[in-house]
Each structure stands twice: as structure tokens, then as C-alpha cells.
Image: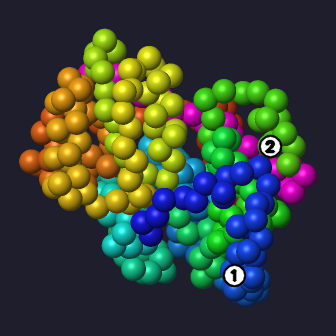
Amino acid sequence: MRFKKPKFWDLKKPNFLSYILMPFTIPVKINNILLNLKSSKKNSKIKSICIGNIYLGGTGKTPATIKLFNICKNIYSNVCIGKKYYSSQIDEQILLKNKTNLICERDRTKIIKKAINQNNRLIIFDDGLQDKKINYDLQIVCFDKKDWIGNGCILPSGPLREKLDSLKKYDIVFLKSNNYDSSMNQIINLIKNQNPEIKIFQTYYKPINLNKFNIEDKFIIFSGIGNPRGFRETLTANRMNIIEEIVFPDHNSYEDRDIEKIKEDAKSLNAKIITTEKDYVKLSEKNRTGIDFLEIDLIIEDEEKLINFIKSKVDEKH
């Protein structure tokens, strides 16, 4: 899906537009009820983890998937990533293929069969919490602290695929933030009110290739991701001088004229160009010339606690 998130989604409470769209949330709510009525058995031949979200876009689930793959491959010998194929999400698929052991098919049950045939012990799905055909052994929900649940409304009145009370059926929350303040405590309390047993881990992005850049330079940045604000804030937090930002729809497919215009602007402003790694992998070799990307690592606080919890789920017998 290529879209620019409506601004009213992330207001603190519903506005006039949200209320107008309320009738259109009914099919989503009915679909969620029907999905939750479905039952499925856990697969006895492979363990599964799913990293997803209930807030649409920009929660950091793909970096979290890559991080969890790197953690788990040091514990278990055979680990793979599962990603359902969508033609609109080629960027995420390329990134996962470059950094993990990826299996990508149009159906998640086929992905599991392929993972079993390859003798994998554990499969980690990037996205798929709402796919009730699979009974995952561990389910992780990603949030960004600043966006949180937006106006709290279901699509299309707001950004939520499911209401917050869906946290009752999940195991872990990854809560992404660059700082800990009183709002973090409020969010944690809201999560715990829904599910006292859920484990909460604070995460944040750490740039790992900053030495490529000269902070004395001026920079133009561009991105087509779910949360462009987070990309910009990561750069400014590291004292990068951002003089222009161009935001494209999430999962944008770049045309030559898009990149030519950016390069013309950079030349006229005597600025360097930075994008995200997720955007960079979609550029042609020609268009990559003169463009750098920010490489990030997702840091998980209390990582040892997370590892122990994963082991308790993966090592247990069905």
C-alpha cells in the first residue's frame, strides 16, 4: 500500500473527519471479530514468532525483525525470516533478503512448509499478526512512542488495524523511543491495563555509519517510509544540518525524474543527499550515484531478558 498518512489520524482524539468515517470502520471491526473466531493449531515441526503492529505503518517492525533474526541465529542453528509477498513492499523484501535468510511467498502457510523443508527450527515473520491461519508461538507488537495509537480509532477513522484491547492476546510489546519521560509511563500503564502479563521492551535506533558523513556539510534528505519523522529526528539528534526534506508515500517507487529533481536541488544548495537504507535499495545503480543512506541498528533494552523469554517459548514442547 502506497499512502501518505492523514494528519488527523495522529491527533490526540478523534476530530470531525474521524466521526464522518466512523461508519466505514464497521467492516473492519466485523472482519476482526470473524478472524478471532477462527482457530488454528501450532505447528509441531517448527517454532514461529511474528513481529507486527496494530498501528498502520512506521512502527519499526522490519528493523525489529532483522534485529531478532541476528539475536536468534546466535542461539539456534537454523533460523529464517518469513515475509508474505506484496508487490508494493519490494523495499522491505530486498532489505530482508540482503540481511537475513528470507523466505518470501504469497501465502504464509507455504512459507512455513518451505521453512520446514529447509530444516529450520525457528521462523520469524515480518508482519502477519492479523493472519489467523497461523498460531504463532510468540507474538510481538511494535509501537512508536510519539505516534502511539494516534487518535485511537480503527481504520479509516484512525490508524489502528485493531483496538488496543487486542493486546490481551499478544506476548510482547516493542516500544520505540529515543527518550524516557512521563508519557512513556502513561503508555506502559495503558498497555499493562490491557494485559498485565505482556512483556514490554523499550527500543531505539542507533546509527552505525555516521563516520561516513561530515556534520559540517548541509544535507537534503528524502524518504518513502511509514514514519519519516523518525528518520529526520535520528539525523538531527546526531547534529546533522538538514536544510530540506522531501517526503514520498510509504513504499514509494522512485522514478528517474524524482531523483533528478533531488540532485538538482542538492547541487543548487551545495548539499549532500541522504536517504534511508530501505529507500536506497530500490534505487537504480545510476540513481544511487551521489546518494548515501543512513544505516541503523535497533537497540533493545534488557536484551538478555528478551532472549530468556524467547528461549522459554521456543524451547518449550507443544
Residue on which disc 1 sits:
24
CB of mark 2 within 8 Å of CB of mark 1? Answer: no
Name the side, left or right, on which 54 lies relative to 95. Answer: right
Name the side, left or right, on which 227 lies relative to 99. Answer: right
Q: Quadrant of the N terminus?
A: bottom left
What's the residue type where badge 1 is placed? Phe
Which x, y percent locates residue 111?
Answer: 42, 74
What's the residue type where badge 2 is placed? Ile
Which x, y percent locates residue 315?
Answer: 63, 56
Which x, y percent locates residue 279?
Answer: 32, 49
Which x, y percent locates residue 237?
Answer: 50, 22
- Point out which mark residue 187 bears: 2
Query: In the figure, residue 6 lies in which quadrant?
Result: bottom right
Is residue 5 among the parts visible in the rendering?
yes
Q: Quadrant of the C terminus?
A: bottom right
Q: Is residue 197 above or below residue 154?
A: above
Q: Element at badge 1?
A: helix
Magenta residue span: 191-212
